[in-house]
Image (cartoon, rainbow, N blue to C red):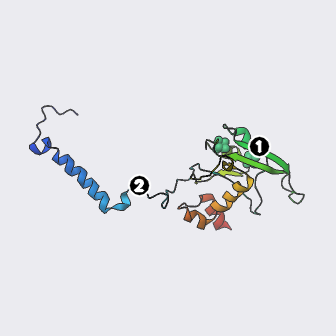
Amino acid sequence: MIRQNLKLTTAEKFYLPAILKGMLITLKHMIRPHDRVTIQYPEERRDHPTGYRGFHRLNKDEQGRIKCVACELCATACPAHCITIEPEPTPAEWTDRERMPKRFDIDMLVCIYCGMCEEACPVDAIELTKIHDWTSSSREEMIWNKEKLLEQYDNTTNEAYMAKMGLSLNPKDQTKKTAA
Ligand code: SF4
Ligand code: SF4
């Protein structure tokens, strides 16, 4: 709406109502700190919503074995071509599957965190966690191998670890915990 022939008061001419309004908003946020949107990272962390795509983990089954069956569908679906898998036969006592990964690497510097690998996996073996902040001193360290990806499963299903990170457990992990 356009106000024609707007007559400003003396106070408005000196922007006093606008300044007062701005100061009242500042005062409101000073006395109600829970309304603030900034956080003291890294001491405080934002808990990302379910479905946030951070670093990967390789899931384990109820017996603590790697879930991956080395079908390589995730590597095929990966648009960044950053997954390398080398299959090997499973031990004779694993009667429920024939293959498992001997090598499973993800180049975290090449990954675009699209989640296509997770979508493609037929056995829910690869999953993206909520953790996004990770540092390393070399490019080589950012190629995560099978052991590192399995370690992420142990960490992110551990309530104490996730609480220390200021993050909540994946709802799926909570369900598993309750059911156990
Ligand atoms: S998140 Fe996307 S880019 Fe990253 S490994 Fe999975 S499919 Fe590849
Ligand atoms: S993570 Fe899933 S899709 Fe990828 S090789 Fe293993 S079982 Fe296949």
Q: Is residue 43 above or below residue 72?
A: below
Q: Nearer the viewer, residue 124 or 56?
A: 56
Q: Residue furthest right?
A: 92
Query: Going from the N terminus, do you reach mark 1 or mark 2 first?
Result: 2
Q: Amino acid at mark 2?
A: Thr
Q: Nearer the viewer, residue 39 or 140?
A: 140
Q: Which residue bears the numbered disc 1? A: 72
Quadrant of the rendering where the N terminus is positioned: top left
Image-based side of 1 in relation to 131, left or right: left
**Image quarter for residue 24?**
bottom left
- Of 157 and 177, which appears nearest the observer? 157
Question: Residue 140: x, y in percent?
Answer: 69, 47
Q: CA distance from mark 1 to mark 2?
A: 42 Å
Whether 168 is drawn above or below 133: the answer is below
In the image shown, does 180 or 28 lie closer to the viewer? 28
Quarter of image, ligand 1: top right
**Residue 38, labelled with which disc?**
2
